[in-house]
Image (cartoon, rainbow, N blue to C red):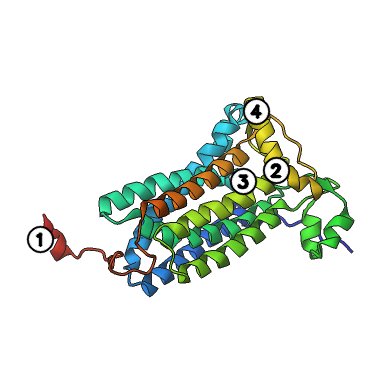
């Protein structure tokens, strides 16, 4: 007996509906915040700094993720402007969220006079953990999936029936790419937490996050059928397809509409290069600040009122 499709609405009170998508996204933010504050306390960093940072960065990430998605789907939203704010229907682009959070976070550390890479290393696993959880919101909304597959294919993955049936959209089963990315992110969280104990150079946990997430996103994105895309030069199309080509041994590429370049693949490719260049350049330059080097990594605290008055 097949399971029924999960209702995207979790709770309804009259005309007010609470969607699973919002619950999952909110849970992802809270769990990521918990991990970041736990690490901050473990390293002697005032957890209020992390809380203040998240208060600014989480809304910025949501706004950036939505704007990014709306911009690349402007033909639809121009005709349906009321849907621009309907985030509960899905449509949050992770890369847009990263841009929004990065810009606001950079301004935050500049104002607070905090070394950027210290906080970037601290929150990197939290970001990836939030992304891992957030992908289940796509699962509930039956979005961010790959191309058609048979039910037997999903059964061979040893998936529970409730996941298999949720991937049945109007009688057709689809690749659970949300699950592939969620598992990839979970492994990444474990690797980042391990990396922190190997005492890397300051910033390398953050750059490892950029590399790991982008690597998985690049290859998984090629399976998806709802990728944001644009029409770019043929040489770039051929380059990205060539890099992705080993995946053809296992999967067929997903249908691509609206362009010949998947935006997420291009951004992921650039972030992979950026992470590698930054790590190599800083090591060649001779940067010596270790992740747990307390002389190079001062204990960060929020100034008291008396300190603030004295500084003025």
Q: In the displayed structure, would residue 137 be above or below residue 298?
A: above
Choose the circle earlier in sequence order: 2 or 4. Answer: 4
Q: How far apart in space, not on screen, are marks 4 and 3 (Cα)? A: 32 Å
Secondary element under disc 1, as helix, strand or loop, is helix
Frontmost residue, 235 versus 228: 235
Q: In the displayed structure, would residue 310 be above or below residue 177?
A: below
Choose the circle earlier in sequence order: 2 or 1. Answer: 2
Q: Residues within 10 Å of mark 2 (few under 14, many from 20)?
A: some
Q: In the displayed structure, would residue 223 be above or below residue 34?
A: above
Kindly indicate whether the residue at mark 3 contacts the one at mark 4 (C-beta within 8 angstroms): no
Q: How far apart in space, not on screen, are marks 3 and 1 (Cα)? A: 48 Å
Q: Can you give x and y, in whole percent of width and height, for residue 309 in the image?
A: 11, 59
Secondary element under disc 4, as helix, strand or loop, is helix
Kindly indicate whether the residue at mark 3 contacts the one at mark 2 (C-beta within 8 angstroms): no
Instruction: Give the quarter of the image for residue 76.
Output: top right
Choose the circle earlier in sequence order: 3 or 1. Answer: 3
Position of the C terminus by quadrant: bottom left
Residue 101 shows which numbered tag? Answer: none
Look at mark 3 in the image and give the residue it sits on.
90
Q: How far apart in space, not on screen, are marks 1 and 4 (Cα)? A: 60 Å
Look at mark 4 in the image and give the residue it sits on.
235
Task: Count up the numbered dots.
Answer: 4
User: Closer to us: mark 4 or mark 3?
Assistant: 4
């Amino acid at each position: 007996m097949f399971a029924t499709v999960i209702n995207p609405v979790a709770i309804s009170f009259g005309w007010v509906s609470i969607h699973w998508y919002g619950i999952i996204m909110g849970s992802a933010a809270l769990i990521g915040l918990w991990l970041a504050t736990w690490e901050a306390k473990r390293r002697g960093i005032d957890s209020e700094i992390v809380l203040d940072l998240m208060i600014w960065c989480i809304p910025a990430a949501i706004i950036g993720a939505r704007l990014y998605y709306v911009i690349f789907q402007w033909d639809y939203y121009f005709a349906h402007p009321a849907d621009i704010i309907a985030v509960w229907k899905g449509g949050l682009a992770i890369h847009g969220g990263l841009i929004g959070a990065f810009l606001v976070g950079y301004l935050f550390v500049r104002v607070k006079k905090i070394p950027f890479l210290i906080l970037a290393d601290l929150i990197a696993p939290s970001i990836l953990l939030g992304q891992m959880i957030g992908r289940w919101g796509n699962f509930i909304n039956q979005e961010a999936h790959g191309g058609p597959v048979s039910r037997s294919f999903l059964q061979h993955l040893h998936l529970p029936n409730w996941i298999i049936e949720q991937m049945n959209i109007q009688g057709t089963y689809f690749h659970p790419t949300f699950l592939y990315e969620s598992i990839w992110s979970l492994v990444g969280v474990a690797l980042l937490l391990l990396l922190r104990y190997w005492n890397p150079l300051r910033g390398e946990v953050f750059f490892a996050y950029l590399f790991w997430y982008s690597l998985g996103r690049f290859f998984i994105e090629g399976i998806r059928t709802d990728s944001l895309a644009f029409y770019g030069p043929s040489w770039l199309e051929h380059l990205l397809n060539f890099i992705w080509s080993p995946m053809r041994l296992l999967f067929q590429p997903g249908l691509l509409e609206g362009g010949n370049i998947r935006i997420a693949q291009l951004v992921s490719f650039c972030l992979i290069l950026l992470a590698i260049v930054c790590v190599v350049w800083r090591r060649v330059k001779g940067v010596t600040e270790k992740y747990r080097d307390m002389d190079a990594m001062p204990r960060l605290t929020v100034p008291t009122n008396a300190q603030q008055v004295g500084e003025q």
